[in-house]
Image (cartoon, helix red, strand yellow):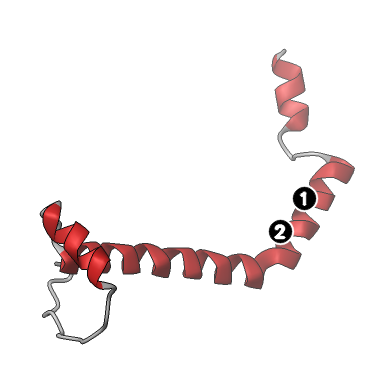
């Protein structure tokens, strides 16, 4: 069950019989496995979307760091 305790919603989908048989033989809770896998896929998709939206900014930042270094570099060099 999700953290926000939203009610479960029934859906229908098909799986290969062999996959179901193996999952049952291993006593896996198919519903939980599917939900967990879907959550992971959602996280990956959101990460990819974020990277796509921010790719140019990240590239510009990295180029700036290569050109002039980090703001803390002078402080770090003094401590050595």
Q: Position of residue 32 (x, y in %)?
A: 18, 64
Q: Position of residue 39 (x, y in %)?
A: 33, 66
- The residue lying toward the viewer, choosing from 64 and 80, is 64
Q: Is residue 53 left or right of residue 71?
A: left
Please say if the residues under marks 2 and 1 sit with CB atoms less than 8 Å apart.
yes
- The residue lying toward the viewer, choosing from 48 and 31, is 31
- The residue lying toward the viewer, choosing from 31 and 43, is 31
Tell me where residue 55 sits by quadrant: bottom right
Q: Secondary structure at mark 1?
A: helix
Q: Name which residue lies at 80% across and 45% down.
A: 65
- Residue 48 against residue 70 in the figure, above or below: below
Task: Report the residue that reaches farthest toward the top.
Answer: 80
Q: Position of residue 79 (x, y in %)?
A: 69, 16
Q: Secondary structure at mark 2?
A: helix
- Residue 60 against residue 67 in the figure, above or below: below
- The residue lying toward the viewer, choosing from 27 and 78, is 27
- Residue 13 against residue 39 in the figure, above or below: below
Checking the image for residue 62, the label placed there is 1
The answer to whether residue 3 of the structure is visible from this angle is: no
Which residue position holds label 2? 58
The answer to whether residue 72 of the structure is visible from this angle is: yes
Q: Quadrant of the N terminus?
A: bottom left
Q: Name which residue lies at 49% across and 70% down.
A: 45
| Distance from the alpha carbon under mark 2 to that under mark 1 | 6 Å
Q: Is residue 48 left or right of residue 64?
A: left
């Amino acid at each position: 069950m999700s953290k926000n305790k939203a009610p479960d919603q029934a859906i229908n989908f098909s799986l290969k019989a062999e996959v179901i048989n193996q999952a049952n033989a291993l006593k896996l809770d198919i519903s939980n496995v599917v939900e967990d896998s879907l959550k992971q896929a959602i996280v990956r998709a959101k990460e990819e979307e974020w990277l796509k939206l921010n790719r140019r900014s990240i590239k510009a930042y990295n180029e700036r760091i290569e050109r002039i270094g980090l703001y803390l570099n002078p402080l770090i060099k003094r401590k050595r």
